Amino acid sequence: MTGEIFRDAWGIPHLRADGVRELARAQGRVTALDRAWQLEVERHRAQGTSASFLGADSLPWDRFVRRTRLDDTARRCFAELERRDPETAQWVRAYVDGVNEGLDEGARRTPEFARTGLAPGRWEPWTPLGVWLGIHILFAGFPAKLWREQVVRHLGADAVALFAADGPGTSGSNGWLVSGERTVTGHAIIAGDPHRFIEDPGVYQQIHLSCPEFDVVGLAVPGVPGIAHFGHTGTVAWAITNAMADYQDLYRERLRRTGAGVEALDPDGVWRRAARHTEFVEVAGEEPVEVEVIETARGPVVIGGPE
């Protein structure tokens, strides 16, 4: 790897490399050194295997991830990325190579591994996509849709408003761009709102990435290459605000069991075979838990089943 790593007085890594891929590899490695436990927790969460070392409290999440087929989605997305944009796919691969290079050393520095008996695993090229999906899958608000659907089914549509705890019309977020004409320093201010809890370690990692193609300082998401949400180049800055956008469609399926498996009623009134298989979730200190995974032409069944 052609590059160098410098840490300032606050331990923030400043990375410099001869090219984009070399820089991505360095970013992956330094992230594994600094955030090994966080990386492995997020990888297991994306795979639906976190209960294997965190215990039964993580089982509901693992079951949800298995049923939504999050890891499979990440694999398919990466395969499509390789087909459509091989250069970006190689950039992601370089980051993963760096993570794998640094994980063992990072794990030796991190007491949580010894405490839980977890051994660092191996990252696959699609793992960063899985981590990204795992972090953001609940930001679309589909659990609220499921809740409202239950209220309508049992109490009627008029009852939905009774459960609006924050009152009508208050949901939203904010993003700010202030001209230098309105600031004390004379410089513009951009501010976003990522809607994150106070976490330890934090969901972000402050880092400086420099190569001939770009020079950027910002907040990276550990497990994902580059700087996506907050950053600046000295002349250009960006910030995000999570909008809780409505970008997921939910369908109430009609399912039935047959001798050959599970069928779903399609909109044309024809019962058609749904894809079905069984997975087992390992749970620390307990027996494995069986999870039935069903997928219709509309997508995976995230809650409920033929019964």
Image: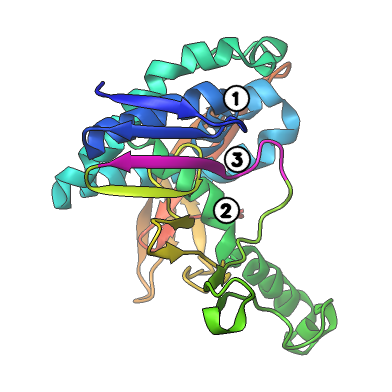
Nearest to viewer (mark 2 / mark 1): 1
Q: Kindly identify the residue that appears in the image at 38 percent across and 75 percent down.
A: 267
- Secondary structure state at the residue bearing disc 2: loop
| First along the sequence among labels 3 and 1 | 1
Q: Is residue 139 left or right of residue 210?
A: right
Q: Which residue is mark 2?
A: 305
Quadrant of the rendered image containing residue 199: top right
Q: Position of residue 142 (x, y in %)?
A: 59, 66
Q: Is residue 213 magenta?
A: no
- Image quarter where the N terminus lies is top left
Task: Read off the magenta span.
Answer: 199-211
Tag 3–tag 1 contact (CB < 8 Å) = no
- As measured in the structure, the alpha-carbon distance from the residue carrying label 3 to the one carrying label 1 is 22 Å
Q: Is residue 1 above or below residue 84?
A: above
Label 3 crowd bin: few (<14), some (14–19), many (20+), radius 10 Å: many
| First along the sequence among labels 2 and 1 | 1
Q: Nearer the viewer, residue 244 or 215?
A: 215
Quadrant of the rendered image containing residue 36: top right
Amino acid type shown at disc 2: Gly
Q: Kindly identify the residue that appears in the image at 62 percent across and 33 percent down.
A: 10
Tag 3–tag 2 contact (CB < 8 Å) = no
Question: Residue at the front extreme?
Answer: 185
- Secondary structure state at the residue bearing disc 1: helix
- As measured in the structure, the alpha-carbon distance from the residue carrying label 2 to the one carrying label 1 is 35 Å
Q: Which residue is mark 3?
A: 63
| First along the sequence among labels 3 and 2 | 3
Q: Is residue 202 left or right of residue 295?
A: right
Amino acid type shown at disc 1: Trp
Q: Is residue 50 above or below residue 162?
A: above
Q: Nearer the viewer, residue 71 or 28?
A: 28
Q: Kindly identify the residue that appears in the image at 59 percent across and 71 percent down.
A: 185
